Amino acid sequence: MISQDVVRREVLWAHDRPGNPAIGLMDLMARYALDRGLSVIVEGILHPGRYGDMILGLTRDHRGTTLSYFWDIPFEETLRRHATKVKAEEFGESEMREWWYGTALIDGLDEVLIGTDETPTSTLELVRSHCGWTY
């Protein structure tokens, strides 16, 4: 798993701005793993204007199955879920409102929408079934 938060915030200490160095590093990490036959999950709040070209490039270049998912949940639910996380103390509602961009899909990417009705278990089962992963 390649986590945008980990690469950007913990490895590179970069702000999430256009052209930030995490974009290129995430691309490199994904390609390295894919070229070795590994399954890769790139996850995070991947703003289309910043990460779209990288994600589309990975999708275009990958020879195997590529699937994309988008959490389509309202801000209030995002805020509620954030409050349950360990890093909830690091930032709160005001910062999150600055980052919030709602449902902004990557143009040209076939993204499966996952709504508020989906539980973590049902979401995992959905992804597993799409990928053909078994226990």
Image: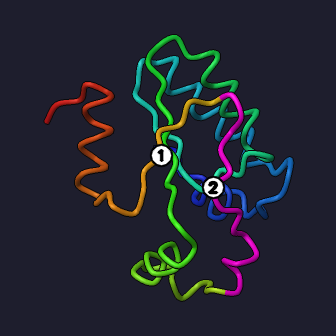
Q: Quadrant of the N terminus?
A: top left
Q: Which mark is residue 103?
A: 2
Q: Position of residue 84 (x, y in %)?
A: 39, 81
Residue 94 picture location, percent across and down:
70, 87
Q: Is residue 119 above or below residue 20?
A: below
Residue 97 percent coordinates (x, y): 70, 78
Q: In this view, does 110 lie to the left or right of 112?
A: right
In-image side of 78 versus 52 (left or right): left
SS type, badge 1: strand
Q: How far apart are marks 2 and 1 (CA)?
A: 10 Å
Quarter occupied by the C terminus: top left
How would you classify the magenta stretch by its main secondary structure? loop
Query: Tag 1: residue type?
Result: Leu
Going by the picture, which residue comes out furthest to the left? Answer: 135
- Left or right relative to 75: residue 81: left
Q: In which quarter of the image is residue 5?
A: bottom right
Identity, as a three-letter code, of the amino acid under mark 2? Thr
The image's mark for residue 113 is 1
Number of numbered markers: 2
To which quarter of the image does residue 17 belong? bottom right
